[in-house]
Amino acid sequence: MKLRIKYKMLSPVSHIGETASTGSYFQTVLTSSGRVPVITGNSIRGQLRDSMAAHLLDTISKNSLLGAKVSKDVFNILFSGGNINGTMKDDVEKAKKVREHFPMISLLGGGLGDMIMAGRLISTFAYPVCQETESITGIESDLSWHSLIDEIEFTRMDDAKDDRTADYLLDTTEDKTAKASTQMRFSVQYMAAGTEFVQDFIFLDGTTDLELGAFYAGLVKWFKVPHLGGMSAKGFGLFNAVVGDGEISVKNGGVAVSSEPGRLISAYEDFIEGEGMEYFSMLGTKKEKKNGKAAD
């Protein structure tokens, strides 16, 4: 199964690939038509993982007086994909149980302390709709990406050297007498507001309805504050989007969900509310103490 998301930027978008001196430049990749700017699939997948993890814990919290707090190791697995911190082993039974009780981890995969679980979702790069990407996106365009990219300069101020704000410091002697410049100029390359990107998500064989429900729930969570790339605090990265043939859409901050994704999300939420926090202890691995005894 393949699902395409079409993004249309409502504000400039920055996705830094490299920096030089005080300049930061948009990520590009080489294609048969030359280098083109892209937003990496991994960065979008990371935003989706964060949204899916937050949705999971928020849903559990609704029915728990204590909320849904997790250990640092479990937090890292949910929000960052985890890591390996023990001897690697092939634990088929553990993998089956994790897939059974944690659809989002089964879908995205991750490092579970002593094993790596493969995911069932492939995220492609998000390519701009332009002449140079027609063979990749299958969408014709009269625009070249060169007409959609520019640079903007910012000034970073040192407020400790500003007499209007320095009075709030306990000791301002050093700051007021410092000889360093009170500001720094830097530039950022961005793609213009109005630029369209397309990205494909490929669900591998074996993907379950609960995993699809987790995916759609994560999209809805993300689309409530929709942004791509960096510098969101500066107003960058806001977008409208359409998922597939309109299964889910976001327009000017409003999210619409059609019946089938809505059904899958409801079924998934019912599932995780029933599961609660009972099975979180199976995530990760036990660390070994120096005396040979296992510790949590």
Image: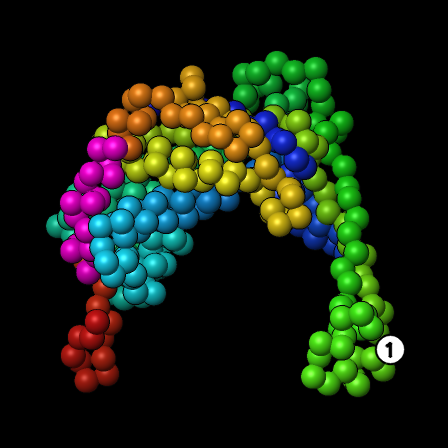
Determine the residue positioned at 40% across, 35% down: 220
Residue 104, percent from left and from top:
29, 43
Image quarter (top left, top right, bottom left or bottom right) of the C terminus: bottom left
- Residue 52 magenta: no
Q: Residue at x 41, y 40 (%)?
A: 221
**Magenta part of the chain:** 266-281
Count numbered badges in the picture: 1
Q: Is residue 271 magenta?
A: yes
Q: Nearer the viewer, residue 191 or 234?
A: 234
Rendered image quadrant of residue 191: top right
Q: Please indicate, yes or no, whether residue 225 appears anywhere in the rendered image.
A: yes
- Prevailing secondary structure class for the magenta stretch in the rendered image: helix
> Looking at the image, is 250 positioned above or below residue 69?
above
Q: Nearer the viewer, residue 95 or 268?
A: 268
Q: Residues within 10 Å of mark 1 (few under 14, many from 20)?
A: few
Image location (x, y in percent) of residue 42: 48, 43
- The foreground one among 147 and 167 is 167
Q: Residue at position x 16%, y 45% from top?
A: 274
Q: Quadrant of residue 192?
A: top right
Apparent side of residue 33 relative to residue 224 in the rendered image (left or right): right
Residue 114 placed where, x, y %? 25, 60
Looking at the image, can residue 99 be seen? no
Whether residue 80 sits left or right of residue 160 in the image: it is left
Q: Quadrant of the N terminus?
A: top left
> Element at badge 1?
loop
| Residue receiving disc 1 | 179
Q: Position of residue 185 (x, y in %)?
A: 81, 57
Q: Amino acid at mark 1?
A: Lys
Q: Is residue 151 above or below residue 32?
A: below
Residue 55 shown left or right of residue 288 in the figure: right
The residue at 70%/45% (across/down) is 25
Q: How is the image coloured?
A: rainbow
